[in-house]
Image: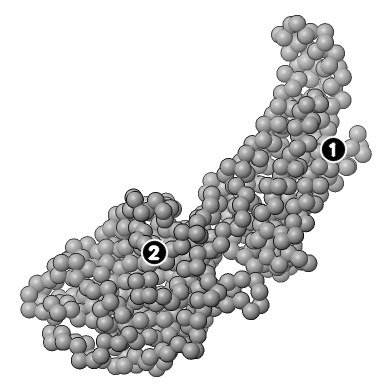
Amino acid sequence: MENKNTVIALVLMLAVWLGFSFLFPSSQPVKEPTSVVSQETTTALSPSVEVASAPVVAAQSTDTSPTVSQVERLLLIENERFKAVLTSSGGRLKSLELKQYQAKTADDSGPVVMLPAGPLRQASLRTSGNDGFNIAEDAYFQFSENSGEKLILSGDEKHSLTLTHTTPSGLQIQKIYSFQGDNYGFELQVVLVNHGTTPLSGTSGLTLVSPWDDSNKGSTTEHIGPTSYVGEKLHQESAEDLVKDPVSYGKDLLWSAFETKYFIAIVAPLQGAAETTSLGKTGSQVENLFQTPYTTLQPGQSSNFNYRIYYGPKDGAILEKAHADFGKAIDFGFFSLLAAPLLQALKFINNYVGNYGVAIILVTIIIKLLFWPLTQKSYSSMKAMQKLQPEITKVRERCKNDREKLNREVMELYKKHRVNPMGGCLPMVVQIPVFFALYKVLMDTIDLRHADFAFWITDLSAKDPYYITPLIMGATMFIQQKMSPSTMDPVQAKVFMLMPIIFTFLFLNFPSGLVLYWLVNNLLTILQQYFINKKA
């Protein structure tokens, strides 16, 4: 009974350690796939690329023979958030880069490239079909209006572009892209019109294509691959598993996407545009296929399928601006209830101090002050247990052959001296969920990406390049343990003295923002323990 407090404390320490080791394994930061972030691919949108103007072409009639040369034409779309290129081959999105995010922290780093220019098979928003709606992937689409060499939008400006193709059977496909000046999201409307003389039946599909590199895999804390929001639940799939076991969802799917740690490409079928959504991996690309319901078009009839699309950062406010349900892509898992207000607190403080490192320090101080009474009670209880230890030792010697009497007399000692053997651990248990919630926030929020703190720490989302803060953190953890009252036997004490070493190695590759939090928390705990020991 007298060792219960020690055993519980040991279990808690091991639980934290094992939780980090298995739930949040330390590893080298996983680099984002070149399909999403690539400094070298920015030439896809450079001025050296010849971007053809979009000629004015009237909608085709039942005479489906092309009257113009089927040569790929490119149109550059630029707003305040991104630069994108549309190609006449399939009417597809050929490349897209984000103007406000750099691929690396270096001043000369290029922008984040979410969709690098490559072969046509890697171009996204591919239109397909079957039966009477059969559409070739490389079908030549004609731009229906002239927008010069590029289309530039800003502020509240909006503009739509229509690309048109007609099949030999008389099926006309219009892909109408609608862009805004200040939004990562845009609309795509696919219109099918039967210009033939006989009914046409089939299904149409729109595919989000994301190039994949097997060397860029996610981890337990970092998902890279397809994710879908279905029935108010987020489903994340492994790209490798999709090779053998493709995944399909029904009408309850709200959106499907391809994500990395900080960026995401989303397609949301609107108004029943998708009967089924299939996720698969073919060769070096991951595909999210949105299949329309089976439809029959009589001559002269048409059918519309609408989609909301987003290419941009995984920032809750920005995602919700693009679409109300896109904000669900930010998921802190089991700790969401605590993580969300902690993230808002970080953002709120950063708005005033202009430094996320300082914001982390201030949030840590606030959390420490909130838990100060509980921690005070915990250390006071452990101090009382330490003072009581000599008497407990005497009882142990006197009753070593009678376990029942031993437990009874120890409990009488606790009652006499008003000591709660659980008082040293329960306050710590309460703080563990808060720690893990803040851990998730500091690990996942894009706000810390490339966020500068001070001195050599220029990216709070990356590890300390010189391992200085993890080493200092380990030293403060050692000092904290030496100052803490203990009733352990020598063997238990030696085991506990290994924890600072274990945690130091564990934190070497953790984001420096998380190490900063733990370091400041240790310093505050040392300060608190100093005052407790001084009063004792």
Which quarter of the figure is the N terminus placed in?
A: top right
Query: Residue at 53% across / 52% down in the picture?
Result: 219
Query: Residue at 11% across / 79% down in the picture?
Result: 196
- Which residue lies most toward the left here? 198
Which quarter of the figure is the C terminus placed in?
A: top right
Closer mark to the observer between disc 2 and disc 1: 2
Q: Which mark is residue 73?
A: none
- Amino acid on which disc 2 is placed: Gln
Q: Around disc 2, counting alpha carbons within 10 Å, would you say few (fewer than 14), some (14 to 19), or many (20 or more)?
A: some
Image coordinates for residue 339, horizontal then vertical, percent:
59, 52
Residue 57 located left or right of residue 195: right
Q: Which mark is residue 482?
A: 1
| Camera sees residue 219 | yes
- Which residue lies most toward the top here? 401
Image coordinates for residue 441, horizontal then vertical, percent:
61, 55
Asked if disc 2 and disc 1 are in contact, CB closer than 8 Å, the reply is no
According to the picture, the residue beneath numbered tag 2 turns out to be 285
Q: Quadrant of residue 482?
A: top right
Q: Quadrant of residue 348?
A: bottom right
Q: Around disc 1, counting alpha carbons within 10 Å, would you say few (fewer than 14), some (14 to 19), or many (20 or more)?
A: few
Q: Nearer the viewer, residue 326 or 281?
A: 281
Q: Nearer the viewer, residue 444 or 369?
A: 444
Element on which disc 1 rests: helix
Image coordinates for residue 264, horizontal then vertical, percent:
47, 65
